[in-house]
Amino acid sequence: MSKPKLLVARRLFPGLLEPLRAHYELDLHDSDTALEPAALRARLQGCWGMLGSGSERVDAELLAACPALRAVALITVGYNNLDVPACRARGLQLSHAPGVLTETTAEFGLTLLLATARRVGEGERYVRAGLWQGWSIDQFAGAPVCGTVLGIVGMGRIGGVIARRAALGLDMRVRYFNRQPVADCEFAQWRPLPELLAEADHLMVVVPYSAATHHLIGAAELAQMKPSATLINIARGGVVDDRALAAALRSGRLAAAGLDVFEGEPAVAAELLACENALLTPHIASSTLPTRQAMVQCAVDNLLAWARGEPGPTPIPG
């Protein structure tokens, strides 16, 4: 009996994929470049499943064009690239990778916060350009972090770890916004979003992306923040209005921003690229080798469970 065909839609760790060969015929897209929609449809013809990232859009149109598709395993925790209701209507098995990247992503969020507040990116570029002529009293004077107010938008797993580390390790006073307060949130106090924006010295965006959170932080919200504040986005591109943010940074309405995610990435708005007070990184918050390997292993474990006729260990909820 022939094996079901599985598209691996990105270059991953070959050794981790080997156990899948016992159950699936693998079609490897061995590239770091995401497949364009037309190419993805073509490669999915006759495929039972796909092992993907957050770049491959699976919606009703693609499902109609790929009738054999029955399963999608993602290496990411976020799954806003999936039209989950459309997938459910077709009976697809769906999985993601929650938990394995929580600590690493929280660690990077605090790294980006510290580097942004202390103007590390600007200073590093200054040295590399050969402009440094010696020490001066106010050169690249940044914003303090210890003892200040951290506002967190989105108190999920990652937000909770950031709150604990910021409170215990940096003596920060942590406030957060969720649609509903989180029970037993030991290290942070809930605030309505307008109050959070006005109070925060540093704002960390960690909320999942959805239609409801698109441009959750836009021009009106940025106008409510302190001019001395910094904004950090490790959530998803689109939660923050990048062009409105660039305008606030250019005008002095906001002191600085650290961004690991962007609208339409890997493209980055030219307005942001022109902002010296924006520290920009290429979606690497989860990028330690053990974490990235664990993300792939999570998808592999789900696919192996499905091959045995068992439920996957980390199904997408709902």
Image (cartoon, rainbow, N blue to C red):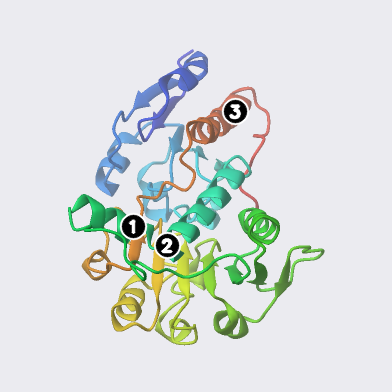
From mark 1 to mark 2, how far is it between C-alphas?
A: 7 Å
Q: Which amino acid lies under the numbered mark 1 shown in the image of this protein?
A: Gly
Q: Which mark is residue 301?
A: 3
Q: Which residue is mark 1?
A: 121
Mark 1 residue element: helix
- Name the residue: 45% across, 34% down: 51
Residue 269 shows in this picture: yes
Asked if residue 181 is positioned above or below residue 236 in the image, the reply reads below
Nearest the camera: 23 or 29? 29
Question: Residue 165 vs residue 216: left or right?
Answer: right
Tag 3: amino acid? Asp
Q: Position of residue 89 (x, y in %)?
A: 55, 52
- Residue nearest the viewer, comparing 249 with 49: 249
Mark 1–mark 3 Cα distance, whole angstroms, equals 39 Å
**Dot 1 and dot 2 residues touching (CB under 8 Å):** yes
Q: Mark 3 and mark 2 in contact (Cβ < 8 Å)? A: no
Q: Badge 2 local density, few (<14 within 10 Å), some, or many (20+)?
A: many
Tell me the distance, in whole angstroms, between the alpha carbons under discs 2 and 3: 37 Å
Total labels drawn = 3
Identify the residue under disc 2.
Answer: 116
